[in-house]
Image (tube, rainbow, N blue to C red):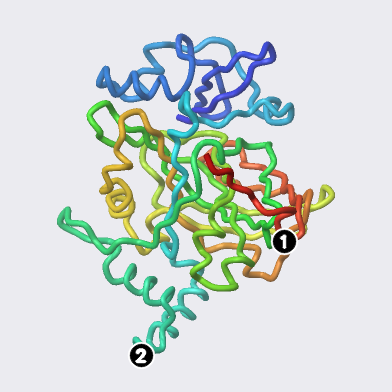
């Protein structure tokens, strides 16, 4: 089952459930956020709760996308209580990329970059057995719900940005129960929008390069994550695709297990606060920037993978030329 949220023609928000090509409004629920908390408190699965609530009118999701009525699939009442985070260096990439990577890893420890050392750590200890934690991954923070962008809306780079590039990823969608237990709602497509030119200046700028908006959705896939996910990432300019590449995800294509990635995020008390929502992105091995593509204002990112329903589409908005228009002033009290 796929769940999404849309704005109805009368302006109301509706939760939509989809099986195959048929999509319907879920009765008696105001949001996926409320639905998830209700399920936790009642001990029901989301699929069972949707079945018990029943569905109403049919919805044309493609038309909703064309009309700009797709909403974020989940957002708490206070957007500051949604956390956008992710992990990197988690994917194995294509066969050719893996061969090249293994050749580099064959070198001496002192010859490896920090990134390559981290990648090797993941290969050796990212998929632990016996219920024990494995090696922790690279981790980064992107922002809160004020940085979250629905499908169809602009991904805006700040005026000081040097670049705006896509990262096609799968994100886990989580909500924290009243007792601090993390619950996984499901999975969604995500565009972990980043500034790769800034990151390339010095890897210590990674944190700066990640503080950008991100998009996820428009639908949440309930249940387990498929082991092997094959998707497509596109860049569209003036209505024409000018770059396109397949991407893979799922544990069959990763050096870390999902359980290990989840553990190393939720082991921190600050990420187990009741009612908070977490959108945690699991990384990618496919970037247009790696193919020396430079995006420009008005380009459209499109990320798709069949298990996740509608594609995730976002125009790029570049407003500056690499430096802030003026100093940000702080006022003393």
- Residue at 68% across / 57% down in the picture? 160
Residue 290 screen position, x and y as percent: 62, 69
Q: Does residue 320 appear to the left or right of 212 in the view shown?
A: right
- Counting from the top left corner in percent of width and height, residue 130 is at 15, 56
Please say if 302 is above or below 19: below
Classify mark 1: residues with Cα within 10 Å, few (<14), some (14-19) or many (20+).
some
Q: Is residue 317 above or below residue 61?
A: below
Identify the residue at horizontal 35%, vertical 61% (top origin): 137
Give the quarter of the image for residue 9. top right
Which label belongs to residue 322?
1
Could you say where residue 228 lies in the image, as x and y percent from the top left? Answer: 43, 53
Question: Is 67 in front, or is 23?
Answer: 67
Residue 132's disc is none
Identify the residue under disc 2. Answer: 108
Left or right: 78 in relation to 134: right
Q: How many marks?
A: 2
Left-right relation of 298 to 271: right
At 72% from the left edge and 45% from the top edge, which residue is drawn? 315
Vertical placement of 252 versus 125: above or below?
A: above
Q: Residue furthest front?
A: 333
Q: Nearer the viewer, mark 1 or mark 2?
A: 1
Q: Which residue is most to the right?
A: 238
> Does dot 1 land on a helix, a strand or a loop?
loop
Badge 2, how many Cα within 10 Å: few under 14, some, many 20+? few
Q: Is residue 293 left or right of residue 167?
A: right
Which of the marked residues, 1 or 2, is nearer the chain's N terminus? 2
Q: Quadrant of the N terminus?
A: top left
Residue 201 is drawn in which quadrant?
bottom right
**Front residue (pair 13, 223):** 13
């Amino acid at each position: 089952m796929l769940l999404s949220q849309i704005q109805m023609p009368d302006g109301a928000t509706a939760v939509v459930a989809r099986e195959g090509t048929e999509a319907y409004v879920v009765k008696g629920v105001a949001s996926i956020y409320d639905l998830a908390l209700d399920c936790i408190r009642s001990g029901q699965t989301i699929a069972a709760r949707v079945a018990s609530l029943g569905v109403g009118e049919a919805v044309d999701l493609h038309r909703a996308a064309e009309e700009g009525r797709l909403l974020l699939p989940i957002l708490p009442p206070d957007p500051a209580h949604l956390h956008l985070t992710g992990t990197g260096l988690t994917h194995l990439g294509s066969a050719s990329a893996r061969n090249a990577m293994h050749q580099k890893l064959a070198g001496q420890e002192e010859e490896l970059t920090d990134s390559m050392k981290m990648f090797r750590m993941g290969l050796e200890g990212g998929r632990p057995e016996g219920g024990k934690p494995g090696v922790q991954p690279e981790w980064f923070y992107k922002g809160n719900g004020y940085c979250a962008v629905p499908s169809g809306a602009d991904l805006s780079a700040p005026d000081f940005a040097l670049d705006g590039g896509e990262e096609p990823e799968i994100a886990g969608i989580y909500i924290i129960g009243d007792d601090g237990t993390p619950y996984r709602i499901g999975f969604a497509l995500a565009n972990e929008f980043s500034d790769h030119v800034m990151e390339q200046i010095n890897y210590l700028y990674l944190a700066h390069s990640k503080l950008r908006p991100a998009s996820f959705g428009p639908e949440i896939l309930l249940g387990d994550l498929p082991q092997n996910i094959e998707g497509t990432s596109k860049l569209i300019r003036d209505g024409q695709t000018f770059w396109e590449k397949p991407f893979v995800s799922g544990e069959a294509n990763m050096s870390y297990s999902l359980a290990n990635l989840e553990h190393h995020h939720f082991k921190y008390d600050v990420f187990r606060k009741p009612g908070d929502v977490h959108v945690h992105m699991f990384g990618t091995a496919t970037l247009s920037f790696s193919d020396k593509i430079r995006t420009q204002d008005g380009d459209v990112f499109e990320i798709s993978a069949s298990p996740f329903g509608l594609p995730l589409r976002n125009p790029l908005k570049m407003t500056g030329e690499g430096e802030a228009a003026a100093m940000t002033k702080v006022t003393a009290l």
